[in-house]
Amino acid sequence: MKIAVIGTGYVGLVQGVGLAEKGHEVVCVDIDKEKIEKLKQGISPIYEPGLDELIEKNIKAKQLSFSTDLASSINGAKAIFIGVGTPQGEGGAADLSYVYTVAREIGESMKEYSVIINKSTVPVGSAKKVADIIKENYDNEFDVVSNPEFLREGMAVSDVMNPDRVVIGTNSKTAKKIMEEIYKDFDCPKVFVTPESAELIKYASNAFLATKISFINEIAGICERVGADVKEVSEGMGLDKRIGDKFLEAGLGYGGSCFPKDTRALHQIANLNNYEFKILKSVIEVNNNQKRLIREKIKKTFPDMRGKIFAVWGLAFKPDTDDVRESPAINLIRWLIGRGVKVRACDPIAIENAKSHLPHEVEYFDSPYDAASGADAVVVITDWNHFKEIDKNLLKEVLGEHNIFDGRNIFDPREMKELGFNYHGIGRRV
Ligand SMILES: NC(=O)c1ccc[n+]([C@@H]2O[C@H](COP(=O)([O-])OP(=O)(O)OC[C@H]3O[C@@H](n4cnc5c(N)ncnc54)[C@H](O)[C@@H]3O)[C@@H](O)[C@H]2O)c1
């Protein structure tokens, strides 16, 4: 099937490549000329394991192409995916301006029936809103379907190729048939619901996962007060199949381009509908406090941190991605610099993306040992394997003062103490 995908970010690009790999003829469209030029040469603008190989393979097979021209790209496409950004807007609501711009352009350029598919995360009622915008310029038949995406950055290729489920929100029989054809080679449950339910499934899923994270962070707070260890508690809880061990890791809280904005957007949806979503409000509050917790721990050890040298390990909001949107590293580094600390930042792949968000004083290092050399403290922000597998004896040799603030609990506090480190984890028993 000929398919157009509008927006070639983490979602649109991987979705487009995945559909091409499954045998569809896909054109990916973006307004960012530089991105499209790179993609035409087979170079991915984002870091996702396995993505470059699939791009190259499908360009060669003529299953995949790239363009900046929406009008010509949607010509003849039976399905048009919208995968542009929906960042946080005013009052926490999702900013739908990019989606609406694309909807308007589709309406102006469409020539025959097509299914327009909202892949972006959008509030309940957006399928209808997108249809209304298209109708302003196009008065023949078309359908708008909600088909939210659940991929995890860093695992995007395997998540798109082997999803747990595909959620499809539509009331149209024609659109349902086309969606079945698009996903016929994806071996997973297909959940057909109304557009409203599909839109809510996405927000509810992210809010639930965020709730697990804030819950275990609250448990970590109790652990610190009663002498329990949150790693032991979450392991003991997670073995219960009803609970599961995923998203039960205490730390600096959730970040990234989705959970923070999607929890706020769902809270806003509830508010607009006169519903007080009490749990979600607390989840957001707990997460905001969690990011500040490490500062309190640092201040306790360094009441005056002026002139100190800190190695900050990790800039990406989580491992295996170069995405730094809402990464706790950004605000923490700004806070440290504001207090006169010399910051040496280290990340395996996110340095280039982080630079534009950080003060010019920050120094960057590829090697965690070089960043830590002669420093007064190491602050772990991202749980990259790179850091987990560190030679602790060598680290001890190079570090000036042996302070470790482990925001992701990647080290064993007892082992670190034995090695002579002044170790601070989150909810850990030393
Ligand atoms: N990143 C994730 O892990 C993830 C997971 C699931 C769902 N989502 C949702 O998917 C959507 C996209 O997220 P993302 O992370 O891929 O965003 P992104 O910022 O990485 O990419 C968006 C792309 O859309 C392009 N764009 C903007 N306006 C355009 C236009 N008028 N025409 C063509 N292209 C245009 C931008 O240039 C950019 O390349 C969001 O709604 C997000 O919430 C993201």
Image: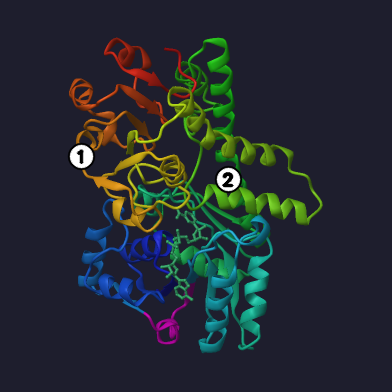
N-term-proximal mark, 2 vs 1: 2
User: In the image, 22: left or right of 85?
Assistant: left
Residue placed at 29% from the left, 23% from the top? 401
Q: Quadrant of the C terminus?
A: top left
Task: Give the label on residue 205, or none.
Answer: 2
202 w.r.t. 254: above or below: below
**Mark sitting on residue 9:** none
**Element at label 2:** helix
Q: Is residue 207 magenta?
A: no
**Amino acid type, label 1:** Ser
Q: Is residue 174 visible?
A: no
Q: Is residue 165 above or below residue 382?
A: below
CA separation, marks 2 and 1? 37 Å
One can see residue 266 in this view: yes
Residue 165 position within the rendered picture, expressed as x and y whole percent measured from the top left: 49, 49
Q: Is mark 1 within 8 Å of ligand 1?
A: no
Image location (x, y in percent) of residue 340 = 40, 40
Residues drawn in magenta: 68-80
Q: Secondary structure at mark 1?
A: loop
Relative to 143, does residue 430 appear above or below in the rendering?
A: above
Of the residues shown, which amino acid type is indicated by label 2? Ser
| Position in image of residue 101 (x %, y %) | 55, 77
Which residue does the image show at 60% across and 40% down from the upper left?
A: 208
- Which quarter of the rendered picture does the N terminus lie within? bottom left
Q: Nearer the viewer, residue 317 or 342?
A: 342
**Rendered residue at 48%/67% (across/down):** 84
Residue 409 spot, x, y in % from top left: 40, 26
The residue under label 1 is: 367
